[in-house]
Image (tube, rainbow, N blue to C red):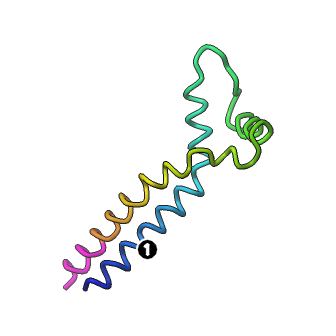
Amino acid sequence: MSSDLFVHFVSGGLAGITAASVTYPLDLVRTRLVAQTKVIYYRGNCHALQTICRDEGILGLYKGLGATLLGVWPSIAISFSVYETLRCFWQS
């Protein structure tokens, strides 16, 4: 049972890292659009993506990803492993 828990923990963490990495650029764009105050720097999603890539490079879309992954990995890993453990317990 403990090996299953470890597998569920690791797979949940990897799933969370993958999901956060794939969706992070869109989350960054959304955050920057919301953070605009009186000066409108981005006119929309596509303009924000283009401007970030032009001004900061393609890696600019991933600024702050490390901090996000530090928060996402443990929470998703714990959630997934608890869910799978309780599901197996319920089915038996």
> How many discs appear?
1
User: Height in image: 70 above or below 51?
Assistant: below
User: Height in image: 1 above or below 49?
Assistant: below
Q: Is residue 58 left or right of residue 88?
A: right
Write the residue at 56% across / 43% down: 27
Write the residue at 20% across / 79% down: 89
Where disc 1 sits, the SS reads helix
Write the residue at 63% across / 48% down: 62
Q: Main secondary structure of the magenta part?
A: helix
User: Height in image: 36 above or below 6?
Assistant: above
Q: Which residues are magenta?
A: 84-92
> In the rendering, at what x and y percent does residue 3 appear?
31, 85
Write the residue at 30% across / 74% down: 84
> In the rendering, at what x and y percent does residue 80 appear?
35, 67
Query: What amino acid is found at the position of numbered circle 1 in the picture?
Result: Ser
Q: Which image quarter is the C terminus in?
A: bottom left
> In the rendering, at what x and y percent does residue 28 appear?
59, 41
Q: Is residue 91 left or right of residue 6?
A: left
Q: Which image quarter is the N terminus in?
A: bottom left
Camera-side residue: 71 or 35?
71
Please check the rendered image and state whether residue 90 is part of the magenta-colored stretch, yes or no. Answer: yes
Outermost residue, right side: 54
Tag 1: Cα neighbours inside 10 Å, few (<14), some, or many (≥20)?
some
Mark 1, residue position: 11
Q: Is residue 88 left or right of residue 33?
A: left
> In the rendering, at what x and y percent does residue 73 appear?
43, 60
Q: Is residue 86 left or right of residue 40?
A: left
